[in-house]
Image (cartoon, rainbow, N blue to C red):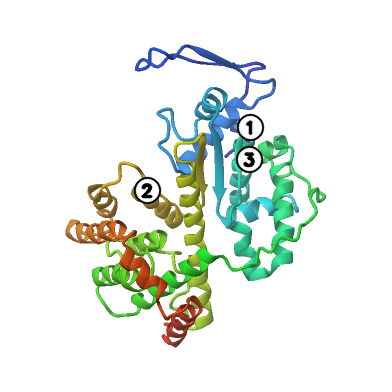
């Protein structure tokens, strides 16, 4: 975004929201924005973020547009709706790095845009499991330090960040720490991550199985039904990863064919964290159902955003097998999309089956053994130059 094209704001601005033609009880309402409120800048930043597809909503976006400031202002002022943004780890970590004096680039300017967009429109940023992921790879001390810097960034004066978002790369000086690192045990293994890791290892195993794409996909669903649990995000990742028609699979399972098999393990672990972010998002969306809270997911990763949209497809009240078929048709033939959708719907319908629950509870294979088995299989699979 070119700084010279930064829009100008009037000194005072009032927004008028007219009555809804379909609701005779609604009346005209007016909001007088505070002095120096950057309304025009927020419109420009919102248009940029919406064009880039950075946000994935866990709700039906308003007619005016997902990132139009009017929607957030109206809903916060008159409907008392609290919007919460769940960023992936890359966004949370980059936001923390900005206050340390990290050299600016295009991605960091977009992080600044997200920060000011959320600040001025009263969107709460909740990093969710982002720092658990960092703790697993770099330890508790590093994760707690970065969490403290994230809080510094989240609470910082938004106006210099606004300048940065519009191209002033010198707008921010390194910031002295404002929050002391705490002693959270962020490295403690999350139960949800361990199960997502097992599912991601199974996807990697099936990738090397030599089976056809559809057989890999149906094999995963059969395994979830008979030997594991239904892991929705992992099942949908497989729907994309195994798809034959130019799927956006790049980055979903990184370095899977590396000659260094430890890098393949790292790639699967990263995929498990992506799945855990999405699991947390769906959990919070379901918890917020019917309340005054709404959830937004944020990521620069196209594959992760596609997964998030697919997850919302199967978690909405109007979900149907036909809706899922249409969601899969871009990557599968219609006949194969229908077979996958039928299997997924049958698996969903079987979630509360008591005999299935009992069989899982009586399994003689522990979580640790399943992880060990999956890692051994992946390590023994040769990479490709």
Residue 284 visible in the shown view: yes
**Taking 181 as reference, is 267 above or below it?**
below
Q: Secondary structure at mark 2?
A: helix
Q: Are marks 2 and 3 in contact (CB under 8 Å)?
A: no
Which residue is more in the foreground, 191 or 89?
Answer: 191
Which residue is more in the foreground, 55 or 132?
Answer: 132
What is the quadrant of residue 155 in the picture? Answer: top right
Which residue is more in the foreground, 62 or 294?
Answer: 294
The numbered mark at residue 120 is: 1
Disc 3 designates what residue? 165
* Left or right of 134, for residue 214: left
Mark 1 Cα-neighbour bin, 10 Å: few <14, some 14–19, many ≥20: some
Disc 2 designates what residue? 315
**In the image, what residue occupies the spot 43% across and 27% down?**
64
**Taking 227 as reference, is 135 above or below it?**
above
The CA span between labels 1 and 2 is: 30 Å
The CA span between labels 3 and 1 is: 14 Å
What is the quadrant of residue 172 in the picture? Answer: top right
* Left or right of 383, for residue 326: left
Q: Secondary structure at mark 1?
A: helix
Q: Are marks 1 and 2 in contact (CB under 8 Å)?
A: no
């Amino acid at each position: 975004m070119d700084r010279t094209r930064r829009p100008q704001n009037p000194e005072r601005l009032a927004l008028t929201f007219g009555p809804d033609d379909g609701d005779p009880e609604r009346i005209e309402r007016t909001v007088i924005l505070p002095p120096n409120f950057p309304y025009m800048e927020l419109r420009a930043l919102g248009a940029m973020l919406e064009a880039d597809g950075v946000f994935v909503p866990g709700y039906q976006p308003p007619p005016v547009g997902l990132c139009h400031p009017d929607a957030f202002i109206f809903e916060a002022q008159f409907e008392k709706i609290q919007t919460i943004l769940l960023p992936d780890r890359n966004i949370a970590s980059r936001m923390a790095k900005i206050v340390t004096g990290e050299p600016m680039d295009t991605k960091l300017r977009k992080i600044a845009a997200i920060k000011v967009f959320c600040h001025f429109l009263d969107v709460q940023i909740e990093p969710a499991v982002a720092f658990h992921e960092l703790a697993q790879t770099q330890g508790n001390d590093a994760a707690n330090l970065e969490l403290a810097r994230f809080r510094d960034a989240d609470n910082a004066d938004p106006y210099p960040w606004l300048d940065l978002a519009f191209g002033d790369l010198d707008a921010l000086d390194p910031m002295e720490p404002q929050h002391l690192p705490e002693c959270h045990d962020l490295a403690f293994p999350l139960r949800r991550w361990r199960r997502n890791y097992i599912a991601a290892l199974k996807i990697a195993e099936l990738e090397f199985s030599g089976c056809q794409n559809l057989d890999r996909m149906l094999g995963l669903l059969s395994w979830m039904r008979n030997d594991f649990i239904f892991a929705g995000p992992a099942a949908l990742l497989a729907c994309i990863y195994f798809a034959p028609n130019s799927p956006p699979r790049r980055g979903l399972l990184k370095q899977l064919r590396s000659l260094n098999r430890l890098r393949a393990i790292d790639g699967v672990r990263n995929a498990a964290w992506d799945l855990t972010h999405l699991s947390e998002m769906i959990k919070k969306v379901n918890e917020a159902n019917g309340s005054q809270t709404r959830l937004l997911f944020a990521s620069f990763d196209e594959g992760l955003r596609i997964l998030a949209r697919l997850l919302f497809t199967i978690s909405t009240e109007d979900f149907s097998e036909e809706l899922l078929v249409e969601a899969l048709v871009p990557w599968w033939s219609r006949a194969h999309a229908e077979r996958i959708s039928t299997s997924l719907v049958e698996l969903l319908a079987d979630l509360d089956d008591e005999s299935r629950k009992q069989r899982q509870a009586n399994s003689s294979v522990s979580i640790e053994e399943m992880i060990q088995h999956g890692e051994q299989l992946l390590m023994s699979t040769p990479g490709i130059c």
